[in-house]
Amino acid sequence: MTQTMRKREISEFFDGLAGEREKWLARNRFFHEDDHNYLRFLVPEGLRVLELGCGTGEGLRALRPSHGVGVDLSGPTIDLARTKHPDLEFVAGDIEDPATLEKLGGPFDAIVLSDTIGYLEDCQALLASLHPLCTSQTRLVLAYYSPLWEPVLWLAERFGAKMPQPPLNWITSDDFTGLLDLADFEVIKREWRQILPKRFFGLGRLVNRFLGTLPILRRLSLRHYVVARSRRHVAHRPFSTSVIVPCRNERGNIEDAVRRTPRFCEELEILFVEGNSSDGTFEECERVRAAYPSLNIRAFRQDGKGKGDAVRKGFQEAQGDVLMILDADLTTPPESLPKFYDAIASGKGEFINGTRMVYPLEKDSMRFLNYWANRVFAWIFSWLLNQRFTDTLCGTKVLCREAYERIADNRAYFGDFDPFGDFDLIFGAAKLNMKIVEVPVRYASRNYGTTQISRFRHGWLLLQMVVFAYRKLKAF
């Protein structure tokens, strides 16, 4: 592939700058440490990582990959990277040249372009050329400067406060969404960080953690981040399915849960996980299992307390490829489960969340305060998670076993914090950049028993959950 004049100028520019990069990294250490810290949040350690435009390899090293490959246009810069990080693999070459990409092997779990997008001749073509290096699990992570900061960065260069650079492509966050869409990538999340990229005696860290992450203000940040996945690797395939029904004092709903669940896949099992009921719920589960011998029904008693513990017990015992949660109160109709199955089997989503807030609610199905609390919490968690939610408390949630195992493997980041079981899954899916899709359901009134949700006690727990999520997902 013949290099353009601009590409040769960029290559020569960074060849000449290679020996000075250490000086510039040290001068702006606060900025680079904060940037690396957030990239580590987006890319869990131990993955196969490819960084395109890796410089001297500090960013790639910060991600702690199990296998790391860095590519850069500048030969002298790559020589320095190999010397500094001999345990990583570095390639000198033009990432817009197909021959360079063909040499990289792959596939990779994460492909990172940090500021590289500003030097490309054809952003859409480069993005489209990355699909052979991807799987359905690969995440493309883009980090770049906000166009709002162009005059500030220009002045910083003139006064020697920032490493000089050739003219950039200044691309907005919305432009990136369009480019990724044209290149057959689907945006999963966007984030804006570093409203103050200098330490300023500790003020920079405080501002970035507690002000720079707030709605509206965060759009003024220096750094923009986009996470996307390849559409070309999303395929429809059949799954076996386990429907987990946590149940406590729900004896009158057990048979209906079986009778009303459609047979939407060839291999379907229903698991009841009973939690210390006083109305004979477990005995009813056993009776229903015996009454429907043609169906794969199993019943367990949970080991601990709470819905979260029951869900984990059910997931542990489940044998299906897809794991579904169906609340035993049946306020989310079992008849809606095929829609959840279709959403995950088609690849449209990797974590499917039910929402009761789209269709009109059945009379007396949700109390007034509960309704507005759900609305407020949904807005807050949409901001915290950088993915849209209209209903975080709908009990019906669906994901593949493989996805759940990844969440469980990374549970140490959040710890054992969730008595509900909903947020352990939601936070885990968001942290791992899974594609989250909501499926609207018609919320019905109870036909048996009474709600086990306390408006004020559980409302207080939800407020604690908001603070917890803020610390773990924003102000870290």
Image: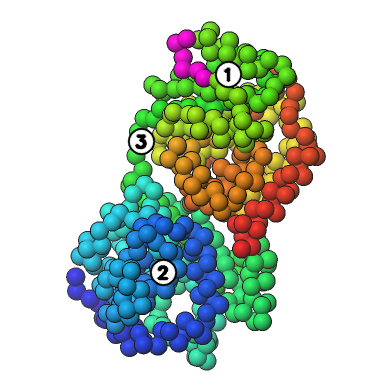
Question: Residue 295 magenta-drawn?
Answer: yes
SS class of the residue under badge 2? helix
SS class of the residue under badge 1? helix
Q: Earlier in the sequence, mark 1 or mark 2?
A: 2
Q: For the residue marked with disc 1, what is the amino acid? A: Ala
- Number of numbered markers: 3
Q: Nearer the viewer, residue 172 or 281?
A: 281
* Quadrant including the C terminus: bottom right
Q: Nearer the viewer, residue 84 or 435?
A: 84
- Identify the residue under disc 1: 257
The residue at 59%/79% (across/down) is 198
* Residue 50 screen position, x and y as percent: 35, 62
Mark linked to residue 236: 3
* Residue 91 screen position, x and y as percent: 27, 71
Asked if 228 appears above or below 335 in the picture, the reply is below
Left or right, 142 with respect to 106, comes to: right
Q: For the residue marked with disc 3, what is the amino acid? A: His
Frontmost of labels 1 and 3 is: 1
Question: Residue 40 magenta-drawn?
Answer: no
The residue at 45%/32% (across/down) is 322
The residue carrying pointer 2 sits among few (fewer than 14), some (14 to 19) or many (20 or more) residues within 10 Å by Cα, namely some
Asked if 44 appears above or below 27 in the picture, the reply is above
Q: Earlier in the sequence, mark 1 or mark 3?
A: 3
- The stretch of residues the image draws in magenta is 293-298
- Identify the residue under disc 2: 61
* Quadrant including the N terminus: bottom left
Q: Are marks 1 and 3 in contact (CB under 8 Å)?
A: no
Q: For the residue marked with disc 2, what is the amino acid? A: Arg
